Image: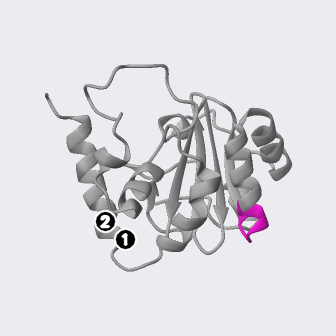
């Protein structure tokens, strides 16, 4: 069961956890603390890359509100914005991730899968540098690498509630798995 998605005062009392397999490991740690909306805003302004900050500003300007948040450091924090869909922004070991659910409380999908599925191309075509044999490099600060959330999220939020989305995302997920775990 997923907790902390209601936008009432009870949300602050709920545990900070995500359901598998979409949990980011640092968030289920016992030291994750729930923060106030003011602390969340300050945290994002102080630690998030500019594109993440612009994405949060876009969400807030387009009717999304911060419904839950937990964690107070770049080792593990999560911010959930709710509007027509649900947008989860997670920082885990200084890497920023974006997950989207087609409606509040629904299963969320990793943003790279959404982008690949939305493009109509294979996962490997959309993200050609992602594979088991790719040259290992420094961890990216914002995932997926080279993608502006602020520029792509409005289109994805409009698309994610349409027909055939689940099947397209499952196909992208299978393609990503094959690409990442191929033994070439």
Q: CA distance from mark 2 to mark 1?
A: 5 Å
Residue 62 numbered mark, or none: none
Residue 15 screen position, x and y as percent: 60, 50
- Compared across the picture, whether 88 is left or right of 115 comes to right
Question: In which quadrant is the C terminus drawn?
Answer: top left
The circle on residue 165 is 1
Q: Are marks 2 and 1 in contact (CB under 8 Å)?
A: yes
| Image coords of residue 3 (percent x, y) | 56, 58
Q: Identify which residue is drawn at 48% across, 72% down.
A: 159
* Structure colour scheme: one colour
Crowding around mark 2 (Cα neighbors within 10 Å: few <14, some 14 to 19, many 20+) is some
Identify which residue, 94 or 179, lies in the foreground: 179
Q: Which residues fall within the magenta stretch?
A: 59-65
* Residue at 52%, 39% in the rendered image: 146
Between 100 and 62, which is closer to the camera in this rendering? 62
Q: Secondary structure at mark 2?
A: helix
According to the image, label 2 marks what residue?
168
């Amino acid at each position: 069961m997923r907790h902390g998605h209601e936008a009432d005062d009870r949300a602050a009392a709920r545990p900070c956890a995500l359901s598998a397999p979409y949990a980011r490991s640092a968030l289920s740690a016992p030291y994750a603390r729930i923060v106030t909306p003011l602390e969340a805003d300050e945290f994002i302004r102080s630690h998030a890359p500019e594109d993440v900050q612009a994405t949060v500003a876009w969400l807030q300007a387009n009717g999304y509100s911060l419904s839950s948040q937990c964690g107070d450091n770049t080792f593990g924090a999560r911010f959930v914005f709710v509007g027509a869909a649900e947008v989860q922004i997670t920082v885990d070991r200084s890497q920023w991730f974006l997950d989207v659910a087609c409606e509040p409380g629904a299963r969320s999908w990793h943003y790279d899968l959404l982008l690949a599925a939305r493009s109509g191309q294979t996962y490997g075509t959309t993200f050609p540098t992602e594979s088991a044999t790719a040259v290992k490099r420094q961890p990216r600060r914002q995932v997926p690498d080279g993608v502006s959330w602020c520029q792509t999220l409005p289109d994805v939020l409009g698309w994610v509630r349409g027909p055939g989305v689940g099947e397209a995302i499952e196909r992208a997920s299978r393609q990503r798995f094959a690409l990442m775990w191929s033994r070439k």
